[in-house]
Image (cartoon, grey):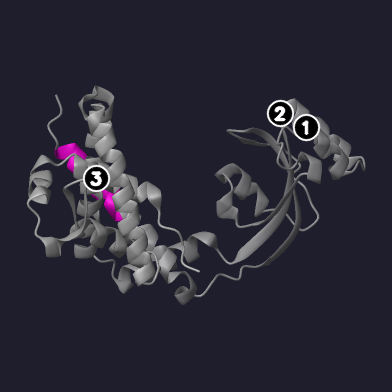
Amino acid sequence: MNRPIRYAYLAALALALAAAPALAKKEKSADAEDTIAVVNGKAIPSVRANAIVAAQIAQGQPDSPQLRNAVREELVRREVLAQEAQKKGFEKKTDVQAQIQLARQGVLIGAYLNDYVRSHPITDEAIKKEYDTIRATLGDKEYKARHILVESDDEAKAIIDKLNKGEKFDELAKQSKDPGSKDRGGDLGWATPSSYVKPFSDALVKLEKGKFTQTPVKSDFGYHVIMLDDTRELKAPAFEEVKGQIAQRLQQKMVEQHIADLRAKAKVE
């Protein structure tokens, strides 16, 4: 079964095209072979349909007569609605004009950034370097920890005293102010030290299995009492398994940096 056409994309595209007077002028004089339909005397250029079909193909939908018919019908429906909106004078409303300009701007930005990404491909060397950096940051072990988080140093010390007297960590964890773990005996599951804030991870890696911190561990969240349940060797995914994700991450960072550079150079008054 074919996936449905993304109508939000169609709406944005239709608005963008409607906002371009020069393009609208060309549409009126479009030749028959460049037109997919004529609605109440106004031609719908085939370039619109081609743009939508290309976007659908890029998302994995196969090109087919059914897809092209669906695109044609959608553009006809939109043209009918757009003509009715124009009769009512909506294109003259300030808020509608603002939305049209934003939609047009969004299409232009998307085209520019897509071109920038194509002309600045992420190399395999850069991806491998990032992979190695991530591996080094993660380390070679995972830790199964639990904690009790409280507001004050004195509260944490009182909990440690109770633990040393034989009270159960699970029960004492009920007074933790961490809602995500308090009802699970403070269990934080398996994670690498880099997943935690530094004071927490520094204390965690020093613990022996089955032991808890004998002094409160202060972080920006409060005071922790940490217990180490177990450790295991970290089984990191192979490079080929995550190569695509890392490439996407580097691509995103590159685009964000490019935008930041352009913003820094812009004269804003």
Q: Nearer the viewer, mark 1 or mark 3?
A: 3
Does the stretch in magenta take in 258? Answer: yes
Which image quarter is the C terminus in? top left
Query: In the rendered view, would you say 85 is above or below 12?
Result: above
Can residue 164 be seen in this snapshot? Answer: yes
Q: Nearer the viewer, residue 43 or 159?
A: 43
- Helix, strand or loop for disc 3: helix
The amino acid on which the numbered mark 3 sits, given as a three-letter code, is Ile
Q: Residues within 10 Å of mark 2 (few under 14, many from 20)?
A: some
Q: Magenta region's main secondary structure?
A: helix
On screen, 232 above or below 150?
below
Element class at badge 1: helix
Q: Are marks 1 and 2 in contact (CB under 8 Å)?
A: yes
Residue under the image location 39 percent in, 58 percent down: 249
Q: Residues within 10 Å of mark 3 (few under 14, many from 20)?
A: few
Instruction: Return the residue at label 3.
Output: 259
**Where are the magenta residues, as a range?**
254-265
Give the residue drawn at x 28%, y 70%. 123
> What's under tag 2, amino acid-wise?
Asp
Residue at the disc numbered 2? 153
Left or right side of 93 for 234: right
Residue 106 visible in the displayed image: no
Residue under label 1: 157
Which mark is first along the chain, 2 or 3? 2
